Every structure is written in C-alpha cells, then in structure tokens.
C-alpha cells in the first residue's frame, strides 16, 4: 500500500501591500495552526519518505513545521505552486516512494482530495487529508479509495 498525505498551506496574511501572491507569509492563525497540525500528524506515527512543498512562502513555512515535527527533510518544487490535480498526482508518483506528504494550494488539493475520496472535499487552510491507496506501487491514475481521513484545525 502507498500513502499520500495532502496538506493545504496554513492561513496566509493579506495585510502587506505590494507583496506578490508567491511571497505572502502566514498570518498569526497560520503560524499557530501549522505546528499544531504537524504535531497531530506526528502523533499518529506517520513519517513520509518524502515531504514535497510548493515554493510559495506560505506553503514553505507550513511545510517547515511538518518537516520539523516529522523529522524529515523538506523538498520544494516550483511546479507545486498552483498545481493541478494531475501535477500534484504526478509529483507524488514521480517520487517512487510508498509514503509522500505534499503541501500545496487550492483548488488543486481539494480537487485531488475529492477524486481520491470519491466525494466533494474542501481542503480548508491547514487541513490534512490522508489517503491509503491499495497496491504496493503507485497506480498510473488516481484511484477512488474508500478509506480516508480529514483533519482541520480546531
């Protein structure tokens, strides 16, 4: 079985004029939620073989919390910024690893989570969705699976 964990970046700050979308930081809530959600995932015992993140500041900062809590290295990929369902899936498959965590953005994350869950899923900021995917290797296309969990900050 392979496992794909999707994490939407934590809440970002829209208060600084002149910043590009790519350089928006986390706001206070995002800075609080990212480490909390990372710690909650770490408590499950999950440790991804690869942790991939968008290069956007808000995603990188969120991913750094997960890298620290899970004690795994962080890899940033420019193609995950604004990635589609297929780009997100392809990035996970390309690792060849049995467990991958991706920190990225909507709408791609919600669309991929919806496809994997077989129902509509809205990935709110800092949501964590875990998908066990049957089979020892990555399938070529995203399957619809019955087992899934979705956690959002409280």
Image (cartoon, helix red, strand yellow):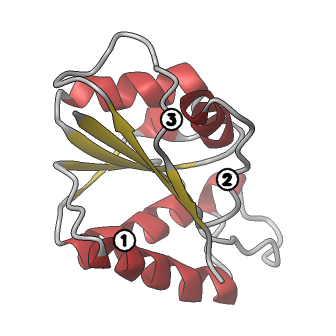
Assign a secondary structure to mark 2.
loop
Relative to 107, does residue 145 appear above or below in the rendering? above
Q: Position of residue 61 (x, y in %)?
A: 46, 70
Relative to 133, does residue 56 appear above or below in the rendering? below
Relative to 56, does residue 78 appear above or below in the rendering? above
Residue with the most extreme top position: 140
- The label shown at residue 67 is none
Assign a secondary structure to mark 3.
loop
Q: Residue 15 occupies which quadrant of the picture?
A: bottom right
Lower sequence index among marks 3 and 2: 2
Residue located beneath label 2 in the image: 123
Q: Position of residue 29 (x, y in %)?
A: 67, 86
Lower sequence index among marks 3 and 1: 1
Q: Nearer the viewer, residue 149 or 141?
A: 149
Assign a secondary structure to mark 1.
helix
Quadrant showing the C terminus: bottom right
Lower sequence index among marks 2 and 1: 1
Label 2 vs label 1: CA separation?
A: 16 Å
Residue located beneath label 1 in the image: 41
- The label shown at residue 146 is 3
């Amino acid at each position: 079985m392979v496992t794909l964990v999707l994490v939407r970046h934590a809440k970002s700050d829209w208060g600084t004029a002149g910043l590009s979308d790519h350089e928006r930081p986390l706001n206070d809530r995002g800075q609080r939620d990212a480490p909390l959600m990372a710690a909650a995932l770490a408590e499950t015992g999950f440790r991804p073989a690869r942790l991939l993140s968008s290069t956007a500041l808000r995603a990188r900062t969120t991913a750094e919390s997960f890298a620290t809590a899970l004690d795994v290295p962080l890899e940033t990929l420019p193609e995950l910024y604004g990635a589609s369902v297929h780009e997100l899936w392809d990035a996970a498959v390309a690792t060849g690893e049995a467990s991958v965590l991706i920190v990225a953005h909507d709408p791609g994350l919600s669309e991929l989570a919806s496809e994997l869950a077989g129902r509509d899923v809205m990935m709110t900021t800092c949501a964590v969705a875990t998908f066990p995917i049957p089979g020892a290797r990555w399938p070529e296309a995203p399957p619809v699976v019955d087992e899934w969990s979705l956690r959002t900050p409280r």
